[in-house]
Structure formats: C-alpha cells, structure tokens
Amino acid sequence: MGGSLAHADPAADYPALILALNAEIHVEGKSGSRTIVADDFFTELFETALKDDEMITKVSFPVVGQGVGAAYEKFPHPALQSLASQRWSRWMVENELPPELA
Ligand SMILES: Cc1cc2nc3c(=O)[nH]c(=O)nc-3n(C[C@H](O)[C@H](O)[C@H](O)COP(=O)(O)OP(=O)(O)OC[C@H]3O[C@@H](n4cnc5c(N)ncnc54)[C@H](O)[C@@H]3O)c2cc1C
C-alpha cells in the first residue's frame, strides 16, 4: 500500500480508497513523524506531500458506526484504455446489503 500511495498514480486503486474513506497517512523521516490527511497527501498527479526523506509507515481509517459499510468497484473507461475509473460508495446496511451487492 505504501508504494502505491507514494507513487500516486491517479488510476491506482489505493489512492482512490484513501481519499474516499478519509484516511490518515502516517509518515516518518529524519525530522520525526507526522500524520497527513488524505486530502492533503496527494498534491498533483504522481505527486505527494511526502518529503524526500520520509516513508509511509502506517495508514489509518476513521472508525465508522455500526451498520455502515463501503463498496469499491473498478471498471475500464473506454477513453482511458488501460486505465480504470473507480466508484466508491458508503451505505447504511440496516441488516441487508444494497441491491447491487446482494
Ligand atoms: C502488471 C501490473 C498491474 C497492476 N495493476 C494494478 C491495479 O490493478 N491497481 C493498482 O492500483 N495498481 C496496479 N499496478 C500498480 C502497482 O500495484 C503499484 O505500482 C504498486 O502497488 C506499487 O507498490 P510497490 O510496493 O510495488 O511499490 P514500489 O514499486 O516498490 O514503489 C513505488 C514508489 O513508492 C516508493 N515507496 C515504496 N514504499 C514506500 C513507503 N512505504 N513510503 C514511501 N515511499 C515508498 C518507492 O520508493 C517508489 O518510488 C499494477 C502494476 C503492474 C506492473
């Protein structure tokens, strides 16, 4: 996961999930450790807020309430050829899956 996030390919799977789930990326470098929220981590296509001497050591996700779930679906986009588009959703399950996952 660390390599995928550091590479910051906009077509990759983990970066999309990290953003959608409001994750926090924990990094360590020569000057110590810090935590970067997902919205601030990706600065440009293939660019991140990582400094040259920093490594990703951990990724954490907010705890969601009971009965809350998430789904991730990837599908090819004809205009992007080998790249993929992603769709993410969160839903309240209330004892059953949404129709597309049932
Ligand atoms: C055939 C193929 C199919 C693929 N399919 C998919 C796919 O379906 N979905 C998808 O999302 N990706 C896909 N990829 C991309 C691939 O998954 C990512 O490139 C991979 O996740 C990178 O992870 P890695 O650990 O191999 O990183 P590496 O290639 O080892 O590193 C990538 C970069 O990140 C840096 N880095 C690595 N770990 C850290 C760390 N902990 N902290 C800071 N920097 C770090 C490295 O120095 C390097 O610059 C595919 C790649 C190939 C070759």
Image (tube, grey):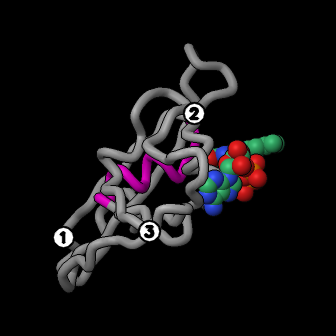
Q: CA distance from mark 2 to mark 3?
A: 33 Å
Mark 2 CB in 8 Å range of ligand 1? yes
The residue located at (39%, 60%) in the rendering is 71
Residue 51 position, x and y percent, is 51, 46
User: Which-is-in-front pick, marks 3 and 1?
Assistant: 3
Mark 3 or 1, nearer chain start: 3
Toward the viewer: 80 or 78? 80
The residue located at (62%, 28%) in the rendering is 83
User: Which-is-in-front pick, marks 2 and 3?
Assistant: 3
Please say whether residue 28 is one of the residues in the magenta stretch.
no
Toward the viewer: 102 or 62? 62
For residue 7, what is the image quadrant? top right
Residue that lies at the very extreme toward the top in this rendered image:
79
**Would you say the magenta stretch is mainly helix, strand or loop?**
helix
Q: Disc 2 on helix, strand or loop?
A: strand
Crowding at label 1, few (<14), some or many (≥20) Cα neighbours within 10 Å?
A: some
The reply to whether the C-beta atoms of the residues labelled 1 and 2 are less than 8 Å apart is no
Q: Give the number of callouts.
A: 3
Q: CA distance from mark 1 to mark 2?
A: 27 Å
| Residue 67 located left or right of residue 15 | left
Q: Which residue is mark 1?
A: 92
The magenta region covers 11-22
Q: Which residue is mark 2?
A: 84
Q: Which residue is mark 3?
A: 33
